[in-house]
Image (cartoon, rainbow, N blue to C red):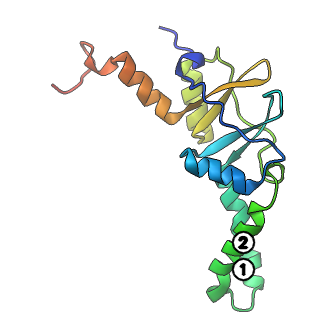
Amino acid sequence: MNTLARELMHPDLTAVMPTDLVHDAVHILYSHNLTGIPVIKDDWKLVGFLSESDVLKAAVPTYLEVLAQSSFLSDEECTFLERFVELGNSTVSEYMNYEPIFLEPTASLMTVADLMLRKKIKRIPIVENGRLVGIIDRGAFCEFLMEADFFDRPGSNSPG
C-alpha cells in the first residue's frame, strides 16, 4: 500500500493574499477553525503561510518592551491588546512566513507524517506546479484511518 498526499488532502482552498488585512485573516482562521492559512497570489501560486502563532508572536510585547514600561506589571495586558489592534490593520505580508513548508500531491503518507512531526506543524499546503491544490491537516490522518477501517482488520489489536 502506497498512500499519497493527494489521497489525504482536502481540496479546501481557503487562503488569503499578501495584501489582505491581518484582521480579515484572523477572522477567517477563527470562523473556519483553522490554525494557519496559505497565502497566495491571484493565480493560486503559494507565496507564504500565516499561522495563528505568527499573529500571536507579533502581538505579544517582547521582554525588553515590557521592562521598558514604567509600570510593566499593570499595563502588559493593555499593551498586548493595543498591539493586537494595530496588528489587525497591517497587511498579511508583514507577518506571513515567506518560506512556507509544502508538499506535492505525490508525497507519501510517511513523508507527510514525518514532516508534520519534525517541524511541529498542523497544516501542510499541497502544491502542484507552484499552485495550491489542497491542504492536509493532522485530522486528515484520523479521518483516513477511520475511512480505511484499519482498526477493524484482523490482527489490528483493536479491543472487542
Quadrant in the picture for residue 75: bottom right
Q: Quadrant of the C terminus?
A: top left
Q: Which residue is mark 1?
A: 66
Q: Secondary structure at mark 1?
A: helix
Q: Residue 29: give x, y in percent of width and height.
A: 61, 48
| Extreme residue in the top direction | 1
Indicate left or right for 123 with 86 as reference: left
Q: Which residue is mark 2?
A: 61
Question: Gap in Å between the C-alphas at discs 1 and 2?
Answer: 6 Å
Q: Relative to residue 140, is residue 59 depicted above or below? A: below
Graded by Cα atoms within 10 Å as few (under 14), some (14 to 19) or many (20 or more), the crowding at tag 2 reads some
Quadrant in the picture for residue 99: top right
Graded by Cα atoms within 10 Å as few (under 14), some (14 to 19) or many (20 or more), the crowding at tag 1 reads some
Q: Secondary structure at mark 2?
A: loop
Q: Relative to residue 153, is residue 55 depicted above or below? A: below
First of labels 1, 2 by sequence position:
2
Check if mark 1's residue and mark 2's residue have beta carbons within 8 Å.
Answer: yes
Q: Relative to residue 150, is residue 69 depicted above or below? A: below
Q: Residue 17: give x, y in percent of width and height.
A: 79, 41
Q: Residue 87: give x, y in percent of width and height.
A: 76, 63
Q: Residue at x 19, y 27 (%)?
A: 159
Q: Relative to residue 134, is residue 26 depicted above or below? A: below
In the rendered structure, which amino acid carries the disc numbered 1? Val
In the rendered structure, which amino acid carries the disc numbered 2? Pro
Q: Residue at x 52, y 9 (%)?
A: 2
